[in-house]
Image (cartoon, rainbow, N blue to C red):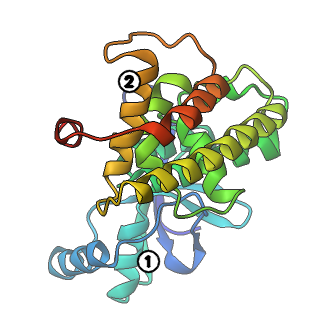
Amino acid sequence: MGEFFSFKEPVKGSELRFQIIPVSKIIIPSIEREISPAHVKKLAGSIEKVGFLDPILVIETDRGYEVVNGQHRLEAAKMVGAEEVPAIVIPPHIRDYIISLNVEKAPNLRDKAHQAYEIFSYYLERDPRMEEVRLEPMVEEPYYLTVGFVLEELGDERFPGYAFERVLRRVDGFLSLPLEEAGEERRKRAEVLLDLKDVLNRRYEELKLTNAILKEAIVSKAFQSIYGKRVKKVEDDFFSVISKLKEEIPGVELTREDTLSL
């Protein structure tokens, strides 16, 4: 198993293990975010100068050691030809909370949505009767799940999620439904979002706009026209809000003030 020693984490008392692990025994789960080649190159330069001083986090599985945090460091180690890396082996139940922190660190909505979908799928496979609301500690925002279904199941990688974030943050929530039923609900929400995207794109083209960020301005203007600029709580459910936006967006006109408010 390699050189190791065990110790207790000082706050929660979790049993951890520091271990030197062969690179060949480390596996990358699909839930990890995409690699940044520039970041890997920078880390590789650091490792060449001072060594590998920051252990990766892994869990032990029947297939090997799965990376929970430290994929960039691992790739940098491979780049400099390291055959072993230092790692801290954590209990499997901690894995999900570490992943939630990685979601928060992901650089954009698309990455966050991909990871939220992976978390959903992970638990769906293991416990389809678990209520979706129990994912709240592990998924930063519930709308990441809906956007994740747009990207993963409906296959629209060009979906302009940023344009809808302000609205989705207010009207999407975690579901008190078993995951197998929540999945159906998320698909329905993803489908109406795709319909709304088509309406938005048509209005964007009609207004002869060239800056994609102004799609957010169109959605915001439509939302304010329906609910007011200072609305504190939206009483309508998710589908009602999307339906009203579909009716409102075709008539939106943007002013200079609207574009400056973003």
Identity of the residue drawn at 50% across and 42% down: 250
Identity of the residue drawn at 44% across and 16% down: 227
- Nearer the observer: mark 2 or 1; the answer is 2
Identity of the residue drawn at 62% across and 25% down: 238
Say few, some or many: other residues with alpha carbon within 10 Å of mark 1 (under 14 / 14 to 19 / 20 or more).
some
Above or below: residue 160 compared with residue 63:
above
- Foreground residue among 260 and 17: 260
Q: Residue furthest bottom?
A: 81
**Residue 138 appears in the figure:** no
In the picture of the structure, the residue carrying the numbered disc 2 is 224
Q: Secondary structure at mark 1?
A: strand
Q: Quadrant of residue 18?
A: bottom left
Give the numbered dot on residue 171. none
- Foreground residue among 234 and 198: 198
Residue 213 is left or right of residue 226, and the answer is left
Q: Quadrant of residue 157?
A: bottom right
| Residue 12 drawn at (x, y percent) | 45, 25
Identity of the residue drawn at 83% across and 32% down: 181
Find the distance from the CA under tag 2 to the CA under tag 1: 56 Å
Q: Secondary structure at mark 2?
A: helix
| Residue 153 drawn at (x, y percent) | 72, 56
Q: Amino acid at mark 1?
A: Glu
- Foreground residue among 100 and 9: 100
Residue 5 is left or right of residue 45, and the answer is right
Above or below: residue 141 compared with residue 162:
above
Say few, some or many: other residues with alpha carbon within 10 Å of mark 2 (under 14 / 14 to 19 / 20 or more).
few
| Residue 162 drawn at (x, y percent) | 41, 47
In the picture of the structure, the residue carrying the numbered disc 1 is 84
- Quadrant in the picture for the C terminus: top left
**Residue 192 appears in the figure:** yes
- Foreground residue among 188 and 7: 188
